Image (cartoon, rainbow, N blue to C red):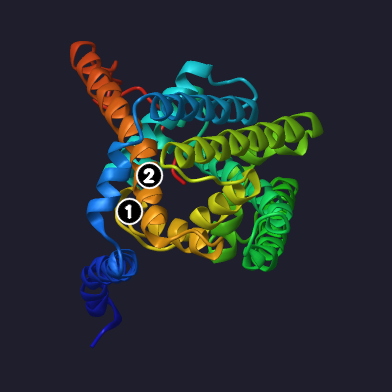
Amino acid sequence: MPPHAAEPSSSRRSPWWGFALRGVVLAAALVFLVRGVKWHDIAVAVKGAGIVLPSVVIGMNACMMGLRALRLRVLLERRLPFTSAFVTLLTSSALNNITPFRGGHVARLWMIERASGVTKSAALAITLVENLLEVAILALLGFVASWLAKGQTWAGAAAPLVFLGTVALLGLLLASTRHATRGQGRDRQDRTGWLGKLRRLLERAEPGFRALRKPGIAWRAALLSLLAWACEATMILLSAHAMGLGLSFPLAIVVLFGINLALTLPSTPASAGPFEGATVAILLFAGIAKGPAVAFAFFYHAVQVVPVTVVGAVVLLAAKRRSNRTPDRLNASGIPATKLEPF
């Protein structure tokens, strides 16, 4: 069979493999969660959480998103207004919660491009910088917290590996993009092979890494990441208190670290399943009973996801209505007047 004949078949099969893998991960998480749990007790615990503390957690979630919006604005060197950065993060998070394969990340690139004027390649680079910087800060916090939290020695072993791997990847990307742009003018002989394609991609992505090479911007972005994680750890503490659990701040940091490791697994929208499974496993290591741990995991995930999804959906619908009333100015080809730079 010729090679080109096999390609359509493999492309049709690949999504099914993705869905199957997500189904297996979700099923494993559900089996782990439901065994030995009294769901009536969980429902009673969730109902007893009240209104005040969940409302405070929702407000702190908005503050955390505001800190990340400030970080995005810093990395874009103030080319993006704070309101646009906040709306971008809010709506992309809402889309991630309701679409498979994290569709919000793709929408985020498009929104950053339109609002700031950077190319999609630069927007992708900035997103990579954000994620790698955030993971590095969390891994560093997780390593320290693992020595202060009960039964969390696994984090003490995993956190240094994550930190070193993240920092190495970030350094490699920074060095590669700088090397690609330095050779941009003097070496144009090989621009066709995979090396040439990689070089062109790095050249287009270089503006997204440029800001991180400035020490002032790098430190501000790192500080905002640290504040955002501290805000989310406080959200965990308040949610646990609402559910009658007494968690320490170091344990809350380790829970965050474990959740974010679990988010790398293939899963359903909003990471339902792995999120709860990781949370419950860490709390079990800390000596908390499974019933209260499951109740807390579902409660915290719901408080974090539902308001963001609802508000983000409202913002998206409002933006769609405005765009229908005032359609984008079209160029001579009938395409909206927006710079669509390829990756």
Choose between 128 and 339: the one closer to the eye: 128
Question: Which circle marks residue 272 in the picture?
Answer: 1
Q: Position of residue 49 (x, y in %)?
A: 36, 35
**Label 2: how many residues lie within 10 Å, few (<14), some (14-19) or many (20+)?**
some
Residue drawn 31% across the image and 25% down it: 311
Q: In the rendering, which numbered label is found on residue 301?
A: 2
Q: Secondary structure at mark 2?
A: helix
The structure residue drawn at horizontal position 22% and vertical position 52%, both measured from the top left corner, is 40
Which image quadrant for residue 221? top right
Rendered view: 88 above or below 122: above
Q: Quadrant of the N terminus?
A: bottom left
Q: Quadrant of residue 330?
A: top left
* 192 to the left or right of 160: left
The answer to which of 83 and 80 lies nearer the viewer is: 83
Q: Residue at x 51, y 53 (%)?
A: 260
Foreground label between 2 and 1: 2
Say whether residue 204 is visible: no
Of residues 178 and 26, which is closer to you in this image? 26
Q: Is residue 313 left or right of residue 280?
A: left
Return the disc, 2 or 1, that comes first in the chain's sequence: 1
Q: In the shown orientation, is residue 109 left or right of residue 100? A: right
Question: What's the distance in space between the residues labelled 2 and 1, CA to CA?
Answer: 8 Å
- Would residue 114 be found to the left or right of residue 165 on screen? left
Instruction: Work out whether 225 lies above or below 178.
Output: above
Q: Are marks 2 and 1 in contact (CB under 8 Å)?
A: yes
